Image (cartoon, rainbow, N blue to C red):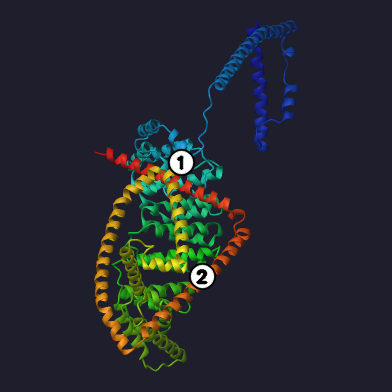
Amino acid sequence: MNTGLRLFLEGHALSWGSIVYLEMRKKDRGNDKSTKLTKAEKKKFIENAPKVEDFLPLSQVKTLYDNLDGNKENKKPVKAQGKEHKTKENEEKKKQHQKQQQQHVEKKKSEPKEKPPKTVKDALNAIDPQELDELLTTAQVRFPEAPLLWLKELNAFLNIKIPINKEDAIFSGKPKDYPLSLVPKAISSILERAVEMTGQQTIQIFYENTLTAMATDMVKGIPVIGHKIFLQLLAHLNPEMTAANILKLINIRNSYENRKNIGLSLLWAWSQAGKKNFAVGLKIWHEVMSPMLETKGYASYVVQILNDLVFGHDNVHDLSLDLYLSIIMDTYSQRFQNIQPANLGKDLSASIDRLRSILFRNKDICYTKLFEMLMGKVSQKSDLNYRNELIKVLADCLVTEPLCFTIWSSIYTKNLYQSSLLLSYIDTNLPSLQTKFKAKHFKETLGIIQNNNEKWKRAKDENLALTCKKTSQVLLKKMTSSSRSFPWRSASVLLLLLISAIVAYDTQKHGSFEASQVGKFLKTSGILKHVEKAWTTLKFYWSAGHKAVKDSSPEYYKAVVDLCAPYIKLAGDVCLVVRNVSIKLYNNVAAYVERNVPIIIDTIEHYAPGILEQIKSRSLQGLEFVKVSFILIGEKVIEHSSASIQWLEKNVFVGKLSPDNLRNYAIWAFDTTQSYAAQTYDWVYEKVQTLSKVP
């Protein structure tokens, strides 16, 4: 019955629905509207739709509603039972999960916590080399064709294992190879092996990515010591690679220049290549770092990097002339004038002077052509500092290649302004330059300048020519007078040797210094007392210092003694030989004088009777006067020295400069030096041991 009723209802409903649907389609086509019903239309449709009561008897309708209600009631208990069952299961699972969490927390509390490393050295020593090696092997297996990912895995591992964030961005006061110098050999060998297995282009990409990663992590406050170690390693292994893409480095610099800490870290990373390759370091400094001279926060470190670079390489002979000229042109520009603080300008000038001396080691440069070229570059419009640097280069050309004097003579009339500046510079620095110049060539050039009688069309040129003539005349006079001057240095050395020989002979002849004529004179004059006092004081402090060094560092003291003992013995033997030769020579001279003095005295007495007695008496008076004068001077010096010492104690040696603080500074300096010496010794010992194991 139910099935028949359902089919009957469905049939009528479909019929009614079809009729309504067809009517609405007709309306929609006429109105060209959407077939979707509104809420009002739906409500109207339900109200107008035929009901069950309109088609079936009342008894059947009642039976239909009872069946529907029965189905609802039968379904209710099943759902309720399912819900209750699920609720119990969820509660049990929740209890088990809470129990597991509690056990996990208790287990963590019972386990001893690992203390984080306090220093970079501790963090590096805590790394297991086997774990690092396994990480590299796993990365190679997972990504056999992607060596870039191998290096990234190692870099990330290293950075996580060194969670130190209190280090200075540029590691001030640390050794130049820090922090790479702290990496154990087992770890560094794995890193080097990974780099060697990677291609040149991949290494360059990884280097640039690591620079960016370091900057990004610093923005987030994440420690970056691992990044810096890897960057330092790459720069040491392959310095040329770091300068392969200068534009990329400039872009990175521009992106983070306004963040000082990141900017300093980038400068530190870029400076590492210069420690191994001078040309690469200078190129990076010039093209990437030198523009930052204008920024107050970076100027000091940029100057320091150049200073370390030029003074850290002694055997460089291939500095490019174009690079040098570009550096001085860029450096001695507006940037140089804007450097703050002002004392950095002196440090920068010292570095440029050193760079100039390196340039003149290059034997491939033709200095005559360079001289002629630079003469044309010097002009009144150029910057003063740049102009002065070019004049210094011209002077060095004259020192290095004497043929430059000939070139100067030939182009003098066309370069009056340049010649006046060069002559003025030589005049100011003549004492140091005269010994380096070839005097003959220089005098010839000065003569040509002085005797030039060319008539000038412009008054300005005439004034410059007159200035050159006057300066050349002054230089010629100075050179002539200096060549005739008395050789005071040689004479002083000979006089000291002669006095030493006389004192030595006098001491040997009378058996002791006190019994010698010189000793008696010093004793009677009172000078000996002060000499003995000074000698006693010097001896006391020498003994105290010797004892302090011996007690504090017996190993180093023994090593120094063992090293110096043969040389000291050799010096003693040489002194003994010189002494014996001097005594023998003096004996011969004394014997000759002893034989001939009576004859000379008789001759003098014959031609000038009584003159020797007068000379003797005058000499004694002079010695007495000198004695009294020295005593008075000594008393005055002692008096004023005491007053000066008291004033210094009250006004100068106070606060940070007090004796106690100075003593503490000295102890700290000694301890620091000893610590660095110990580290150096350990490092050398480790290297020697490593080399000894190599077959």
Q: What residue appears at the point 58 percent right and 21 percent down from the top-left corner?
A: 105
549 left or right of 92 in image: left
What is the x, y in percent for residue 469?
A: 40, 88
Task: Give the image quarter of residue 616.
Answer: bottom left
User: What SS does tag 1 mark?
Assistant: helix
Residue 436 in view: yes
Answer with mark 1 or mark 2, whichever residue precedes in sequence: 1
What is the x, y in percent for residue 632?
A: 53, 71
What is the x, y in percent for residue 199?
A: 33, 45
Q: Is residue 86 above or below residue 293?
A: above
Task: Give the image quarter of residue 429.
Answer: bottom left
635 left or right of 694 in image: right
Q: Are marks 1 and 2 in contact (CB under 8 Å)?
A: no
Residue 370 in view: no
Q: Which mark is residue 546?
A: none
What is the x, y in percent for residue 186?
A: 36, 36
Q: What count of labels does the image hold?
A: 2
Near-viewer residue (553 or 267): 553
| Residue type beneath disc 1 | Gly
Q: Nearer the viewer, mark 1 or mark 2?
A: 2
Near-viewer residue (128 or 542): 542
Q: Which mark is residue 631?
A: 2
- How far is the residue under mark 1 from the one under mark 2? 70 Å
Mark 1 lies on residue: 226
Q: Quadrant of the N terminus?
A: top right
> Badge 2: few (under 14), some or many (20 or more) residues near its Cα, within 10 Å?
some
Q: Quadrant of the C terminus?
A: top left
| Residue type beneath disc 2 | Ile
User: What SS does tag 2 mark?
Assistant: helix
Q: What residue appears at the point 58 percent right and 19 percent down from the top-left corner?
A: 106
> Badge 1: few (under 14), some or many (20 or more) residues near its Cα, within 10 Å?
many
